[in-house]
Image (cartoon, rainbow, N blue to C red):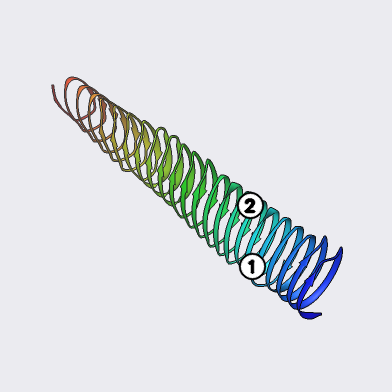
Amino acid sequence: MGQVNYVMGHLNYVTGQVDYVMEPVNYVTGQVNYVTGQVNYVTGQVNYVTGQVNYVTGPPNYVMGQVNYVTGHLNYVMGQVNYVTGQVNYVTGQVNYVMGPGNYVTGQVNYVMGPGNYVTGQVNYVRGPLNYVMGQVNYVTGPVNYVTGPVNYVTGPLNYVMGPANYVTGPLNYVTGQVNYVTGQVNYVTGPPNYVMGQVNYVTGPPNYVMGQVNYVMGQVNYVTGPVNYVTGPVNYVTGPPNYVMGPVNYVTGPPNYVTGPVNYVTGQVNYVTGSVNYVTGPPNYVTGQVNYVTGPPNYVMGQVNYVMGPVNYVTG
């Protein structure tokens, strides 16, 4: 035991203010510790440790090794497998298990939990109030999530997600990708295809499968169900009251329907339809087109060729 210790031996037990220890197996306790060895057990205020297997406790810790078990307020850790707990953690390794308020983690496989997480890796399992995650496959849960990667599984109140394949659940979602499965209160989704369910949905991409209270949808092929639908696309299948639909081919059901397109198949209580070829059923119908097939009382039809059936018909052609 001393103020300053310089120790070299095969098996060392050292206690002091400042310790410099280098050997295969080291047990060190002190204020400031500089330790290099195969297996190191170190406790102190400031620890600089390099070894194969390291067990380190203290604020702060600077640790490099194959397998590291580190606990402290401020940890800088680099190794193959890292088990780290602290207030602020900077960790790099192949496999990382990290817990703390502030985590900055890079590795192949990361298991991270804490209030603030900044994680980059191949496969990431992250949970915390605020998460910034980038990886190949990401499993992220928290109140606010910013996630980028080829495959993302994200759950939280506020999600910003970008990647080819996204599975997202939360009240407010901003999602961009190739294939998106999104469930939430308000969803802003871009990508082909999109499977979206929520209260208010803003969706762009071909094709789109959307169900919600208010839907704003634009895409090549759209399947939309909801009380209020605003849909634009080449082929639209829309169900709900009311429907505002524009596209070359429209299949629309609901009262009322406002439909514009070359070919329209419309069924509803109140239909306003403009197109080249219109198949319309419902009372009343307001139809303008080249060829119109209309059934319902009353019918207001204007076109080149009109086939109209109903008790009251107003036809111009």
Residue situated in front as seen by the camera: 170 or 277: 170
Q: Position of residue 51 (x, y in %)?
A: 75, 58
Quadrant of the drawing holding the N terminus: bottom right
Residue at 48 percent of width and 40 percent of height? 180
Residue 207 in the image, given as x and y percentages of width and height: 41, 33
Query: Who is closer to the viewer here, 24 or 238?
Result: 24
**Residue lying at 48% horizontally and 42% vertically, measured from the top left:** 163
Label 1 is placed on what type of residue? Gly
Q: Amino acid at mark 2?
A: Asn
Pointer 2 residue: 110
Q: Quadrant of residue 52?
A: bottom right
Q: Position of residue 235 (x, y in %)?
A: 35, 28
**In the displayed structure, does residue 94 sit left or right of residue 23?**
left
Q: CA distance from mark 1 to mark 2?
A: 16 Å
In the foreground, 264 or 61: 61
Using the image, determine if residue 75 lies above or below residue 125: below
Q: Secondary structure at mark 2?
A: strand
In the image, taking residue 317 as reference, residue 71 lies left or right, namely right
Tell me, for residue 86, which label it has, or none: 1
In the image, residue 280 sits, relative to residue 231, either above or below, namely above
146 or 52, nearer to the observer: 52
Q: Is residue 261 left or right of residue 140?
A: left
Neighbours of disc 1 within 10 Å: few (<14), some (14-19), many (20+): many
Q: Quadrant of the C terminus?
A: top left
Residue at (43% x, 35% y) in the render: 192
